Image (tube, rainbow, N blue to C red):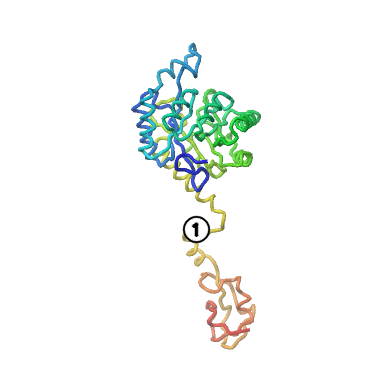
Amino acid sequence: MKIGKNEIGENQVFFVVEEGQFNLGDFEQALRMVELASETGADAIEFQLAYADDFYVESHPGHAVYKSREFSDDQLKELVEFTSRKSIELVVAPLSEQIVVKMTEFGCSAFNINASDMNNPSMLRTVMDSKIPFFISIALASEDEIDWALNFIEEYCPDAEFTMLHGQHTMASGDHGVDSKHTSLGYLRNLESRLGRPVGFVDHTKHIWFPCSAVAAGASIVTKHMAPDHESRGPDWHICLDPREMEQAISMAREVFESIKEGRKVLAPGEHLDRTEMRRSIVASKNLSEGQVISIDDILFKRPGTGIPPDQENYVIGATLLKSMERDEPMDKEFLGGK
């Protein structure tokens, strides 16, 4: 699965900064969030976008709220172009089908089907028709709903380029973020095995360190909310990191990814020096004479580890000394004759 220039799961964590609707309909603030996200080192920024008329019924208070946050076509085009100039990808979480149509035309990099729409056949069809890669957030979803979505995709568009993002969503209940013990990170490997492709995690915890945990558990994609600062109050302010914290979270997650992608036993920088200091060498247990045949009683294992290592004792035992040695003197292969 490719998002812009990024191969998902290929030697990197794809990190998405969720803008969290902090713009509240202010387009200049939206552009500022793109700028801030680009400075964190993120791969992408995600905006939730909607047209109120095909999102809420008109009598619902949410209709007026989202009506006030709509961007014009020119603004949506500029958002795409500005994000591209900042060298990050634009991921759109579409909250109405017409946004999918518009953002397909204007050129976003990917869609993220909101958890509230993962069981919405109209949204799924519209996103698949776009031929743009997409994520499906499966917070709120039961296993049966996940099965339904996978079957729907397989029947409608078997070659769809997509993956799923595990996570939880507890905002409506008044909880200020998901407790880390309720994140069921162990499900990531099951989901990856089930889909046969890299999967991700939507982080709705408050913690700067939690993306590291998600990556260690198997997430190749991480999304996390960011606010311009901790004084700003957008819809999801209580789970947001500020830009400095986000930069740290991304850096830490990538360091963890570098660790877990290495399947070999590789010594860390500095371990060779520690081996010398902490390992032992074969030394003479007492004064030894030239021509003496070395027995096991003639050697001990002591620090430092600058000489012949203990696991080579069979090389030493039975050899003939070519020079006399003093007690505690390290053995050297140059001192040893044939057996």
* Residue 301 in sight: yes
Residue closer to the observer: 145 or 33: 145
Which residue has dot 1 on it?
A: 268
Residue drawn at 55 percent across, 27 percent down = 125
Residue drawn at 36 percent across, 35 percent down = 35
The quadrant in which the C terminus is found is bottom right
- The residue at the far top in this view is 59
Please identify the quarter of the rendering in which residue 246 is found: top left
Please identify the quarter of the rendering in which residue 32 is found: top left
Residue 274 to residue 44: above or below: below
Callout 1 secondary element: loop
Residue closer to the observer: 242 or 5: 5
Residue drawn at 60 percent across, 86 percent down = 292
How many other residues sit within 10 Å of disc 1, few (<14), some (14-19) or many (≥20)? Answer: few
Please identify the quarter of the rendering in which residue 138 is found: top right
Residue 318 to residue 130: above or below: below
Residue closer to the observer: 268 or 113: 113
Q: Position of residue 182 (x, y in %)?
A: 58, 34
Q: Position of residue 208 (x, y in %)?
A: 47, 39
